[in-house]
Amino acid sequence: MEKTVDLRSDTVTLPSAAMRQAMFQAELGDDVYGEDPTVNRLEALAAERLGKEEALFVPSGTMANLVCLLTHCGRGDEAIMGHLAHTFLFEAGGSAAVGGIHPHTVPNQPDGTLDLDDIEAAIRPPDNPHYPHTRLICLENTHNRCGGAVLTPDYMAQVRALANRYDLAIHLDGARIFDAAVALGIEPAVAARGADSVSFCLSKGLSAPVGSLVCGSAAFVQEARRQRKILGGSMRQAGVLAAAGIVALESMVDRLVDDHRNARQLAEGLARLPGVILDPATVQTNIVIFALAPDTLSASELVARLAAHGVKMGDIGGCRLRAVTHYGIEADDIDRVLVAATQVLAAGG
Ligand SMILES: Cc1ncc(COP(=O)(O)O)c(C=O)c1O
């Protein structure tokens, strides 16, 4: 049977043989006592790669972000974030539901940034009792809903300078920060510079089965560890999962360039098809978001018809689709996707 080319997300990746082997052989202990040597190794490695003092292993990217927001903000405090931020759109309102944190959205620009003037206008004067206290600015790199857009170190430095003027913290949702670093040709620590906390995922492009990390200062991570406990995210012999994460960090980062090349090839091919609205120059990493012209198929029709050709993409609403390249997707798979999309769109509505 022909392979299904699943481009819905880089979260569908399966662990490599080396990861499974490392999981099988992992040295284990009780991580809630701090005694799992494999978790400890993963946390040290993550902190080092992200240029922060310490790191904390958590089950998911959603929990990583929530732990960070709960660590930075108290009940009624305000966190500034983009209207397309994952923390705002796709985390079930967790920071409000669990932490009483008030999200204050400002528009995301198409390149994933928040305009500095918009951020500044959103910061509340601290001495007026009508307002919540602004505590935090949340950024996302790469930016999922902005098509994998990359934030530059220069932009991070500008937000840092602004945050310093108002004594605010910065949290970076770096679920795909390794993609950003690879695309910019810089170390992840440089991409994370300026952020007080950064979260990143092992189970997206890095292909580990489970897990994310929270990185920050030793004091921040100490409190984050308590928040993880509150959320029920402290795990016992978690080294069985962390072992795959270590392999991910050591062997799956350099290959992200292949995903970026495949995404660019996909974008260039799709952009040539009738009815597809897409500027391939905007594709910087492994996410391709495109729209369909009103006189062609709807996004859900295209998704259904591609599925009949063994190709999966995501319908993200508003005539738009998302395709994400990842480990297990090769250049000839992209050729197959383009042949299928050509046939489906030529057949029309
Ligand atoms: C930017 C971003 N942050 C956070 C997450 C949440 O990660 P998880 O699915 O592990 O909870 C995702 C998942 O897609 C994401 O794209």
Image: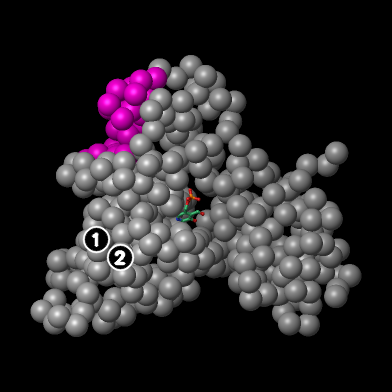
Left or right: 101 as drawn, with respect to 143:
left
* Amino acid type, mark 1: Cys
Left or right: 119 as drawn, with respect to 207:
left
Please give the residue where the numbered disc 1 appears in the rendered image: 73
Q: Is residue 123 visible?
A: yes
Whether 40 is among the magenta residues is yes
| Foreground of the two, 202 or 183 | 202
Q: Is residue 140 visible?
A: no
Q: What's drawn in magenta, residue-wise?
A: 28-56
* Label 1, residues with CA under 10 Å away: few <14, some 14-19, many ≥20: many
SS category of the residue bearing label 1: loop
* Amino acid type, mark 2: Ile
Going 78% across and 82% down the picture, which residue do you hit? 295
Q: Is mark 1 within 8 Å of ligand 1?
A: no
Please give the residue where the numbered disc 2 appears in the rendered image: 101
Image quadrant where residue 300 sits: bottom right
Q: Earlier in the sequence, mark 1 or mark 2?
A: 1
Q: Residue 245 bears which disc, if any?
A: none
Image quadrant where residue 31 sits: top left
Whether 240 is among the magenta residues is no
